[in-house]
Amino acid sequence: METLITNGIRVSVETAYQAQYSNPLENKFIFAYRITIENLGRQTVQLLRRRWIITESTGEAREVEGEGVIGRQPVLQPGESHQYVSWSHISTGLGKMAGAYQMIHSDSQEAFTAEIPEFQLVAPFLLN
């Protein structure tokens, strides 16, 4: 598990290779990831947007941006957390992801960024 705390927000990531949806012969590697976002601060916050950088082992990178996570813009009171599961694909069996959430403090409407830690995407059979 990878974890990073920025601006009072702890983001933790767990990944899992999805062999049943992948097809290595067609350069299709699918990974699921579970994200836990925890508000360690003293103010209520809301997640508005996400931005991902997905990098293949070839060095090719793509950016994915959008509103919220899984169709939601969760509000977190101090001490609360939000967890969701999503997925990504790469064309090599090895890659990485990192990103950031754009958030606001609910009371002041002050915007800030919570970083998502970089994590590896590795098809298990490549570790042998």
Image: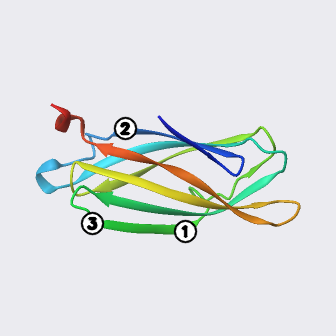
Q: Is residue 95 above or below residue 48?
A: above
* x then y, percent, for residue 6: 64, 50
In three-dimensional space, the C-alpha distance between marks 3 and 1, rounded to whole angstroms, equals 21 Å
In three-dimensional space, the C-alpha distance between marks 1 and 2, rounded to whole angstroms, equals 23 Å
Q: Is residue 69 above or below residue 9?
A: below
Residue depicted at 21% across the width and 60% down the height: 58
User: Nearer the N terminus, badge 3 or badge 1?
Assistant: 3
Numbered disc in front, either 3 or 1: 3
Residue, disc 3: 60
User: Nearer the N terminus, badge 1 or badge 2?
Assistant: 2
In three-dimensional space, the C-alpha distance between marks 2 and 3, rounded to whole angstroms, equals 22 Å
- Amino acid at dot 2: Ala
Q: State the residue in front, 16 or 19.
A: 16
Q: Quadrant of residue 101?
A: bottom right
Helix, strand or loop at label 1? It is strand
Residue depicted at 30% across the width and 49% down the height: 30
- Amino acid at dot 1: Gly
Residue extending farthest to the right is 107
Residue depicted at 84% across the width and 45% down the height: 42
Helix, strand or loop at label 3? It is loop
* x then y, percent, for residue 63: 42, 68
* x then y, percent, for residue 31: 35, 46
Residue, disc 2: 16
Q: Is residue 13 left or right of residue 105?
A: left
| Labels 2 and 3 touching (C-beta < 8 A) | no
Residue, disc 1: 66
Quadrant of the rendering where the C terminus is positioned: top left
Residue depicted at 41% across the width and 39% down the height: 15
- Amino acid at dot 3: Glu
Q: State the residue in front, 121 or 26.
A: 121
Q: State the residue in front, 112 or 71.
A: 112
| Labels 3 and 1 touching (C-beta < 8 A) | no
